[in-house]
Image (tube, rainbow, N blue to C red):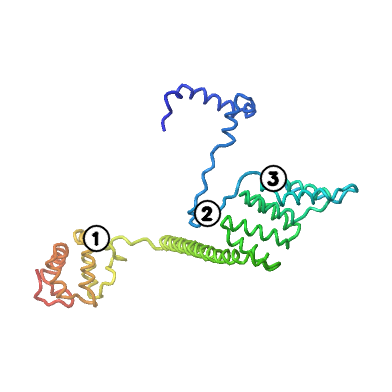
Amino acid sequence: MPLPASLAGHAAGAKELLAAVTKDPSLLEDPSLAFLKEFCANYPPEAPEAETDDDAGGEFMKREKTPFPAVPANAAEAPDDADWSIASTKKSAASAAAPAEALDLYTEALQAEAATACLSATTLAKRAEVLLKLERPAAAINDCDAALKLNPDSCRALKTRGKVRAALGEFVEANLDLSKAQSIDFDPDLASLCAEVKAKAAETSAKQREKERAADLEKKKKAAAERHRRAQEAQARSAPPPPSGGMPGMGGGMPAGVPPGMAGMAQGMMNDPDVMAAMSNPKVMAAFQEMMAGGAPNPAKMMQYMQDPDVGPVLQKMMGKFGGGMGGMPGMPGGMGG
């Protein structure tokens, strides 16, 4: 896209400004350059997340990028003047509040619990439930993870994390969480969701295995092709150089596969430049191999190829070398000639 004419006059100044900022980045702290600082902080802009086949309709939640609510550190021990009622009051109020208000109340309850050295996995799981309602799945998982560090068998944290992962379309992980939760404390109200998640987890695992098999097959194909290429290169390096003075495509000056009775003829032809040139034609070479199949010249084939515009002249020349007739060629009637 060409630079608009209205901006063309500013290009030199922009170039000078960027050079100065590159040399001294502290210039970006100048209030007048706040726009440039913001641009640098957000460049390049994030590309939109590509839709997967599993989420073509946008039915799953997306992990948010906003900061998570803090998980307070548990005090080493409760102070002498600890007020145990604060956390209880906050949690009671949160259970009846709207999600946004409940989030703040559970956060205050967690702070009160941590101050009295009794940070609760259950309270963290309850806040995670509220975060899920607010469509903040990443923060909800963070709270569940923290709860499970306090109590690995927290059924509420496992159930909540399983629900969040199902909402994200992460069915394999969701199935693990929900299955473990049900094994600890079976919840009949959760049975339907568990069955659905289990089926989708199996489907996802099957697709993943197919992808892995295809990738493994492709990897093996590439490795086999590479081995073949290296073997061919090694064979080419180790092969002896082709001998000089012979017919094209023939080794050691003698045609490959020529019967003993034809050796003398072939040797005589090797010094004829016209025959040598003709033998560079794959068609001529193939015709002579066909005529010599079986260890001796095939008269019928030779008569057939006499009419061929490429092979016939070579045969005529060879007959001329043998005194104008074919009687000198093994297996040929003495009367044949050109």
Mark 3 falls on what kind of element? helix
Q: Which of the two residues, 56 or 299, is positioned nearer the viewer here?
A: 56
Q: Residues within 10 Å of mark 1 (few under 14, many from 20)?
A: few
Which amino acid does the dot numbered 3 rest on? Glu
**Residue occupying the point 61% across, 57% down:** 165
Give me the C-alpha separation between circle 3 and circle 2: 27 Å
- Give the image location of residue 258, x and y in percent: 26, 72
User: What is the quadrant of the N terminus in the image?
Assistant: top left
The residue identified by callout 1 is: 280
Of 85 and 236, nearer the camera is: 85
Above/below status of 279 relative to 327: above
The location of residue 280, given as percent across then percent down, is: 24, 60
The amino acid marked with disc number 2 is: Glu
Give the total of numbered labels: 3
Nearer to us of marks 3 and 2 is 3
Q: Quick check: marks 1 and 3 in contact, CB under 8 Å?
A: no
Of circles 1 and 3, which is in front?
A: 3
- The dot on residue 181 is none
Mark 1 or mark 3: name the one nearer the start of the chain: 3
Horizontal arrangement in the rendering, residue 229 relative to residue 280 (left or right): right
Q: Amino acid at mark 1?
A: Ser
Give the quadrant of residue 275. bottom left
Q: Earlier in the sequence, mark 3 or mark 2?
A: 2
Q: Is residue 93 left or right of residue 140?
A: right
Q: Where is residue 229 shown, x and y percent of the image?
A: 43, 61
The label on residue 59 is 2
Observer-side mark, 2 or 1, equals 2
Residue bearing the label numbered 3:
101
At horizontal 27% and vertical 62% (from top left) the residue drawn is: 248
Asked whether the residues under the numbered discs 3 and 2 touch, taking CB atoms below 8 Å apart as contact, a structural biologist would say no
Residue at the farthest front position:
96
Helix, strand or loop at mark 1: loop
